[in-house]
Image (spheres, rainbow, N blue to C red):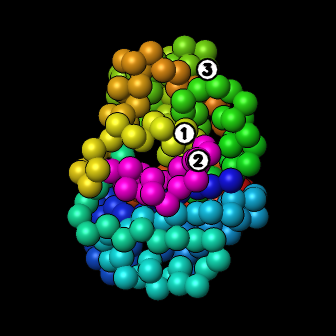
Amino acid sequence: MQAMILAAGFGTRLLPYTKLRPKPLFPLLNEPLLLLTIRRLQAAGFDHIVVNCHYLKEQIVTALAGMSGVFVQEEEIVLGTGGGLRLAMSNLRDEPLLVSNGDIYHTVDCKEFYLNHEAGGAAVTMAMQDYPRFNKVSVQGDIVTGFDEPSGENCLAFTGLHVLDPDVLEQIPLKQNYSIIDRYRALLREGKTIKALRVDGCSWTDMGTVGDYLNLHAKLLKEEI
């Protein structure tokens, strides 16, 4: 199984702290989030992991040096989520790809999620939760029908964890800033299926703000996760 961790962002929501360290390297109980994510993926059976980087990239390169099965993709310009994935195609195998944002902590069973996608027949499977603060993806049953929708009873939050078939990336312009969500919108227009997999029973935190970061530590220390 293969995975890619998106770790190229500027971490602007956590300024000024991200002036010194990229957000994926922020520690969780003294272990950088990025290393924790990689360790969990490897334990689940992912033996080919690509990590892209741009902002303060030398820190990520150093942190991952010598790690077996981990490949660092240095990006000289900002490529966005879709552009980074498109650039990685030459380093991917012809099999589904699990993608994870580099600033999320979760307890989703990534192997089960990956196998669910393989068995489901959709072009993309997105892990979703009912999280009112982020409920912007419209769904009908287990099918995604739209993005950036007004929050409502048929909307869920995209967790930043998804599995896609590599050919989904072929239409993304090479070496251009491009959002993967824009590609997913195009897939819907093309009549392709994007599946929504509910993971409400799992813990999930978008480590976007100082408050989110501190609250995550509190939950970990109290063993609530």
Question: Residue drawn at (39%, 40%), measured in percent from left and top?
Answer: 170
Dot 3 crowding, Cα within 10 Å, few <14, some 14–19, many 20+? some
Closer-to-camera residue (124/169):
169
User: Looking at numbered disc 3 in the image, what kind of residue is underneath it?
Assistant: Asp
Gap between marks 1 and 3, in whole Å?
16 Å
Q: Is residue 95 magenta?
A: yes
Nearer the observer: mark 1 or 2; the answer is 2
The reply to whether residue 128 is in sight is: no
Reading the image, the residue beneath label 1 is 164
SS assignment at label 2? loop
> Foreground mark, 1 or 3?
1
Q: Is residue 31 above or below residue 214?
A: below
Q: Position of residue 186 (x, y in %)?
A: 35, 26
Q: Is residue 138 magenta?
A: no
- Residue closer to the observer: 53 or 155: 53
Which of disc 2 and disc 1 is earlier in sequence?
A: 2
Q: Residues within 10 Å of mark 2 (few under 14, many from 20)?
A: few
The amino acid marked with disc number 2 is Asp
- Vertical arrangement, residue 203 with respect to residue 15, above or below: above
Classify residue 124 as left or right of residue 182: right
Residue wearing tag 3:
142
**Element marked by disc 3:** loop
Cβ–Cβ under 8 Å for marks 1 and 3: no
Measured as percent of width and height from the top left, residue 120 is found at 68, 27
- The circle drawn on residue 94 is 2
Give the quarter of the image for residue 10: bottom left
